[in-house]
Image (spheres, grey):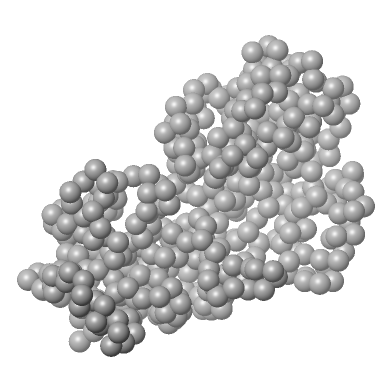
Amino acid sequence: MDAKFPKKLERLFEPSRYKVLWGGRGAGRSWGVARALLILGTRKPIRVLCTRELQNSMRDSVHQLLSDQIDRLGLGQFYRVEKERIYGANGGQFSFEGIRNNTTKIKSYEGVDYCWVEEAVKVSKHSWGILIPTIRKEGSEIWMTFNPEFEDDYTYQRFVLDADESCIVIHTTWRDNPWFPEVLRQEMERDKIRDEDYYLNVWEGQCVQVLDGAVYAKELRKLQREGRICEVPWDKSWPVDTFWDLGRADATAVWFAQRVAMQTRVLDFYSNTGEDITHYLAICQQKGYNYGTMWLPHDARAERLGSKKTIEEIVRQAGYRVQIVPKLSVTDGINAARIAMNECWFDQKKCADGIRGLRAYRFKVVDGQRANAPLHDWASDSADAFRYLAIALTGAKPPEESILDKLRRAMRKPEPEFANEDWRRGPTSLDWMRY
């Protein structure tokens, strides 16, 4: 068997709970991990879970990479490659799952010896909280490979900056790969000339502050420069308001913030997928804040399948004060968010996943040109929830209706005039701000 490795990757055969391989493109990390796991699988029957934050199909997984390495190592007689699994002749097995959309399935895995987390920098704090307790077999290991994005990404913070004795941390770039191909070398040199920031991130593995084309690039740079992403204290004398983006297939995202003097203290963030409203209300209760208003989007008034009640009604009946965020266009909401960020202070740890979403929220690119509409992907959930926060904070209102629109609305069944008001409980922190 011809099984060569870059020298740094020889540490993959040392025992350690965590093995963290990170750095720039062309270093051969994924290639080396695939090869090491396949070799280990010939020595004894092992169960390997190959996972990532999102996996919509097997094409998103490392299935093909492992299949290619089986051929290169001449292990075609030992491994049987099937559509969704790879089996070893000794009873070993390679499985492939996404974490975020398969939390129940991930929790059901038993007896995993090795877990390979590809693109690990995209794995949220919540997903790590699901995955790590699942890999609990004695002597089990979690291997991760990634190119870094932002310095405050949870994975980078925990397993690189704050790594302890349980981690073998290996930083690699193209320089550590003796088989670095010439075609990639030429591409790298072109990137270095065209865009040095891009080169430093992609090829040298340095962190970036914001993604190219990020909607809030300017505002996030200013937040970072002024030190407003930091440890933010909770002032218990002021209520905490929540701002929601509701989803099922998409994640439901919630920001927790309070207005103190002229500051908006963004204290916390929570997001999850596939849970009903009672789950999020339970999370709110667990956090223990003194709540003011739950700000919900306009679709909270729609009845949910299988329920005769709306989200708005359920939240009210749980004892919370509710307001519906005015319905503005996405463009107007983004403008409100840009204004609101000038007075925001974000808690670096508790808001880490939400900030990561804001940084990754970017405009669509069509035929090489930036479109006006943002891209709808995983980052949209936290960004939409923050947009609602900004609309509520700034008191932004929809544009004046035209006469034709008023006539059309008059012909429809009117909604209760005070459907989103609950004046009996008195004003909250946001209400005081408006007067």
Residue at 60% in and 61% down = 150
| Image position, residue 63 (x, y; %) | 68, 33
Residue at 25% in and 58% down = 302
Looking at the picture, does residue 57 appear above or below residue 280?
Answer: above
Q: Is residue 36 visible?
A: no
**Dividing the picture into quarters, in which one does residue 65 lie?**
top right
- Taking the view exactly as shown, the residue that stands out farthest to the top is 90
| Image position, residue 311 (x, y; %) | 23, 55
Looking at the picture, does residue 222 appear above or below residue 106?
Answer: below
- Foreground of the two, 260 or 427: 427
| Image position, residue 431 (x, y; %) | 20, 78
**Dividing the picture into quarters, in which one does residue 47 lie?**
top right
Q: Is residue 26 left or right of residue 391?
A: right
- Foreground of the two, 109 or 77: 77
| Image position, residue 325 (x, y; %) | 28, 71
Q: Is residue 328 left or right of residue 43?
A: left
Residue at 85% in and 29% down = 72
Q: Is residue 283 left or right of residue 81?
A: left
Quadrant containing the C terminus in the rendered view? bottom left
Quadrant containing the N terminus in the rendered view? top right
